[in-house]
Amino acid sequence: MEVPGDLSWHRQVQRPFLVFGGMGRRLRYTPPGGALFEVTCGTFQRRLLLRPSPQLREITLGVLARAQEQSGIAIHAFVFLSNHYHLLVTTTDAAQLAQFVGYLNSNLAREVARLHGWEGKVWARRYEAILVSDEDSAQVERLLYLVRQGCKEGLVDDPLEWPGATSWQAMLSGDPPTGIWFDRTSECHHRRNGAPSSEHDFAIPQAVTLTPLPVWADLSAAERRARLEDLLDLARTEARSRRKETGRRAIGPKAVQRLDPLSIPIDSRRRPAPLVHAASREVRLAFLEAYRLFTAAYRRAADALRAGLAAVVFPDGCFPPPGPFRKPAIA
């Protein structure tokens, strides 16, 4: 796509929100043909509700696998921290991504609340989906960002030591990450009928299918493992350097698992997410221009719908808003 000569507009589309019916939120946009996205979602008040434990790790993998099975999305990498998660996924369109994350978040929230006896909301707000360009360096940089999680915060010295659900060991071994999905619907029906049972009677093994990162798709399994090992080594080296500079050791995986899941970190600020991760300015601006055209078309259609027009066409790949109330004709 050609980059326009006047670039003054690109500052206005970094965090565009459209308002309809009193609600303002960023539009979901997936380029035609699908794209790679980094998906992230944080817990309510940044509480450590996802604090790792062997049980939660197994449940997280099971829910993730079930969400993938329901949506058909391609999962490339993932890491679940104590108060947020990161995924690298390829989706065909915004509807598939919404189905996947909706299923993942709703079911994981239910299991987290059950584990901790938590009665409040689990997620802070809706998920962020940040497009990752098809540039090699952009995709590898985002994978490295996920690999660094846990190390850069001084929690562990090695990404493989993180006790929560990650894809690293599976990407090295080639074995699918496997967890447990609890069929709560069948469990509920069974108990309503008064039949004695245990929740383990409704535990179903579920495996996540990992797909190579798009830029690594043509590499052999051995080459992909070697490149991942390079990223893991880089994270380890950075952790050693950080320890040497600060004099502070990582608290370690056992201490991580002893943290109170209801506690709130001292630094719980939420930083704004970009629209796109791109290695070059040209690619980033080209995506922002495509997004600007998409939002402009949506706004025109939304304005027409709000004005009461019935035959309104919204751009392909969007979620149209509900229509306005139509008053009945007075006889």
Image: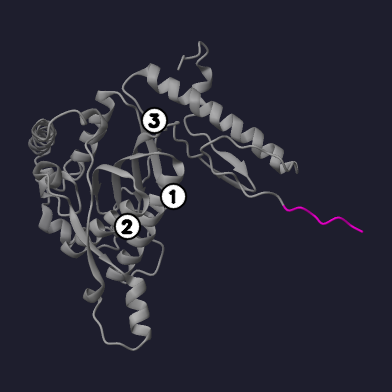
Say which residue label 2 marks: 47
Asked if the residue under mark 1 is in contact with the one under mark 3, i.e. CB atoms within 8 Å, the reply is: no
**Label 1 neighbour load within 10 Å: few <14, some 14-19, many 20+:** few
Q: Choose top left, top right, bottom left or bottom right for residue 315.
A: top right
Residue 71, given in percent of the width and then of the height, sits at: 37, 50
Amino acid type at mark 2? Arg
**Label 2 neighbour load within 10 Å: few <14, some 14-19, many 20+:** many
Amino acid type at mark 1? Arg
Nearer to me, 269 or 107? 107
Q: Residue 276 carries which label?
A: 3
Say which residue label 1 marks: 126
Q: Measuring 26% from the left and 73% from the top, which residue is drawn there?
A: 202
Nearer to me, 112 or 213? 213
Q: What stretch is highlighted in magenta?
A: 325-331
Q: Is residue 234 left or right of residue 64?
A: left
Magenta: main secondary structure equals loop
Asked if the residue under mark 2 is in contact with the one under mark 1, i.e. CB atoms within 8 Å, the reply is: no
The question of residue 306 being in magenta is answered with no
